Amino acid sequence: MDEVLAGHVEPFLEFHRQVYGLRVERSRIVNYLLSDFLGISSDEMRKRFQAFYDSEELEQVVPLPGALKETSALSDKYEFVVITSRPTHWEPKTVAWLRNYFPTFEGPHFAQNGHSFKGGNKKTKLEWCRDLGVEVMVEDNHAYLAGCTDAGVRGVLIDCPWNQEPLPEGVARVWLGRCCKTHSFKRQLPLRTK
Ligand SMILES: [Mg+2]
C-alpha cells in the first residue's frame, strides 16, 4: 500500500522535520528500516510513526501520481487486492483511506511487518498472496518479495533508494522516472486476473 498506492514517505518526512527538527531527503534513504537509517531505536521509530498516524498530517498521504489512472486502466483485466504491513491497530484510518481513494479494491489485509512494529498478524504478504490467488505482487520492499517464486507469485519491485539490494528470484525491477514522486505505474497492490 505505502509507496505503491499511497505516498506515505514524503508527508512523514515533512512531519518528522517539523516535530523532530531533522530534515531527511527521501532520495538519501538507502535502508528500508528507517530506524537504522536515522540511528534511533525501533521503539523510538515506532513512536514517531505513531505520532504521525495520530496527527492531522496523515491527511497529506494521498495516492501517488498515476496510481488512480493506471489501476483504472488495468481494471478490465485485473482485480486488485491490497495487502499491507501496516500495524493492525492502524486499521481504522487505513480502511477509511482505501475506501475513499480505491473503493473497488479488496482489503486491506494486514500482514506481518518487518520493521519497527511488532505483533499483529503473523501471516506474511506472500502467504496472503498464495491464499488469495494473487499472480503478481508489486512492492517497494525487496525483502517482502523473497521467496515469491516458491509461493507461485511473480514479483515487481518498484525502484526506490531503499531497495537497491540484488533482486530475489522471480522479481523484476521497474523504474518509474522519479520513482514514487512521479511514477505512473499501478503500485504495490497485488494483481489477480479476472
Ligand atoms: Mg510499501
Image: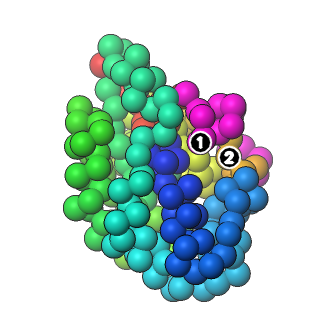
**Are dots 1 and 2 in contact, CB under 8 Å?**
yes
Which residues are the magenta region?
165-184
Q: Residue at x 35, y 56 (%)?
A: 59
Q: Is residue 8 left or right of residue 36?
A: left
Report helix, strand or loop for mark 1: loop
Depth check: 104 or 60 in front?
60
- The residue that disc 1 covers is 180
Amino acid at the residue labelled 1: Cys
| Residue 163 x %, y % | 69, 51
Q: Quadrant of residue 51?
A: bottom left
Establish if 118 lies above or below 96: below
Q: Nearer the viewer, residue 172 or 130?
A: 172
Q: Amino acid at mark 2?
A: Cys
Q: Nearer the viewer, residue 32 or 21?
A: 21
Q: Dominant secondary structure of the magenta stretch?
A: loop
Q: Quadrant of the C terminus?
A: top left
Q: Up-down: is 33 above or below 74?
A: below
Q: Is mark 2 within 8 Å of ligand 1?
A: no
- 168 is within the stretch colored magenta: yes
Q: Is residue 93 above or below residue 129?
A: below
Q: Which residue is mark 2?
A: 160
* Relative to 108, residue 47 above or below: below
At a point 54% along the width and 28% down the height, the residue shown is: 185
